[in-house]
């Protein structure tokens, strides 16, 4: 599902137009990104949590040359799925047949 399909699904489940649904989705995403960038966590009960996590400096390898390279320490966004989300995915996976 891409962003346009998500906006359409939101519009179908609410009484909002696609334009209003798009604005609402953009506002949610922008708010989450801004909060996590400031170092705050965003927790949506049943869905999951967004937070910033520190990644230590490490040594890597250039896949073309095999040369060792230094990868600098950085801060990255992290998402942890909530219990309801995990349960829904596990149940849905069990129902799919190949």
Image: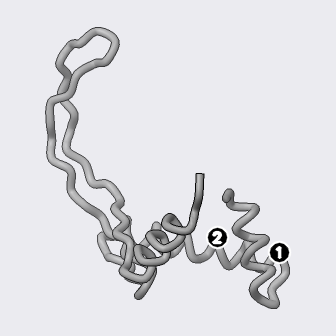
SS class of the residue under badge 2?
helix
Report which quarter residue 47 is drawn in: bottom left
Left or right: 59 as drawn, with respect to 34: left
Residue 97 picture location, percent across and down: 59, 58
Circles 2 and 1, Cβ within 8 Å, touching? The answer is no
Residue 59 picture location, percent across and down: 15, 30
Residue at the far front in the pictured view = 97
Q: Nearer the viewer, residue 59 or 38?
A: 59
SS class of the residue under badge 1?
helix
Query: Depth-wise, is mark 2 or mark 1 nearer the camera?
Result: 1
Residue drawn at (49%, 76%) of the image: 88
Residue drawn at (20%, 22%) of the image: 69
Q: Label for residue 26?
A: 2
Residue 96 picture location, percent across and down: 58, 62
Report which quarter residue 65 is drawn in: top left
Residue drawn at (40%, 77%) of the image: 48
Dot 2 or dot 1, earlier in sequence: 1
Q: Is residue 47 above or below residue 55?
A: below
Left or right: 33 as drawn, with respect to 57: right
Left or right: 8 as drawn, with respect to 32: right
Q: Which image quadrant: the N terminus?
A: bottom right
Residue drawn at (49%, 67%) of the image: 94
Query: Badge 2 local density, few (<14 within 10 Å), some, or many (20+)?
Result: some
Residue 25 picture location, percent across and down: 65, 74
- How far is the residue under mark 2 from the one under mark 1? 12 Å
From the image, tell me which residue sits under label 1: 18
Q: Is residue 42 above or below residue 63?
A: below
Residue at the far top in the pictured view = 65
Report which quarter residue 71 is drawn in: top left
């Amino acid at each position: 599902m891409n962003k346009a399909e998500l906006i359409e699904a939101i519009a179908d489940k609410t009484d909002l137009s696609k334009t209003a649904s798009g604005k609402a989705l953009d506002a949610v995403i922008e708010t989450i990104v801004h909060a996590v960038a400031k170092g705050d966590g965003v927790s949506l009960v049943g869905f999951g949590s967004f937070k910033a996590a520190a990644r230590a400096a490490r040594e890597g390898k250039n896949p073309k040359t095999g040369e060792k390279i230094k990868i600098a320490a950085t801060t990255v966004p992290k998402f942890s799925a909530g219990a309801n989300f995990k349960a829904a995915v596990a149940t849905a996976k069990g129902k799919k047949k190949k």
